Amino acid sequence: MASKTAQKRLTKEYISMQKEPPPFVWAVPDEKNILTWNYLIVRDFTCSLQSMPITYAARSP
């Protein structure tokens, strides 16, 4: 499970992504584990949907 620091930071970043979505990217965290995200990246008219576990430290990678 995510640390409180990671959970707080990822929640803040997710809210920011909802307000100003990056172009060609859709991403949402899993409802039960904020360290697991589903994302869609559209590039060159192709799409991929994957689930990616994220190891998230207290600072940005």
Image (cartoon, rainbow, N blue to C red):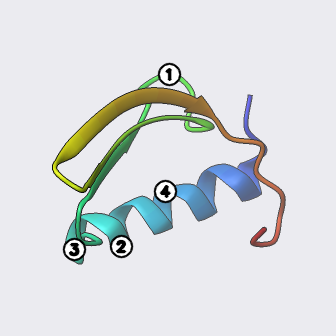
Q: Amino acid at mark 2?
A: Ser
Q: Residue 16: which numbered mark, if any?
A: 2
Is residue 6 found left or right of 34 in the rendered image?
A: right
In the picture, which quadrant includes the N terminus?
top right
Disc 3 to disc 4: CB gap under 8 Å? no
Whether the residues at callouts 2 and 3 have beta carbons within 8 Å, the answer is yes
Q: Which residue is mark 4?
A: 11
Report the residue at 63% width, 50% height from top: 7
Q: Residues within 10 Å of mark 3 (few under 14, many from 20)?
A: few
**Residue pictured at 50% horizontal, 22% vertical:** 32
Per the image, label 3 sits on a secondary structure element best described as helix
User: How far, Cα to Cα, is label 3 from label 4?
Assistant: 13 Å
Tag 2 or tag 4, which sits nearer the N-term? 4
Who's the residue at 57% across and 32% down the image?
A: 52
Q: Residue furthest left?
A: 45
Horizontal and vertical percent position of residue 14:
41, 59
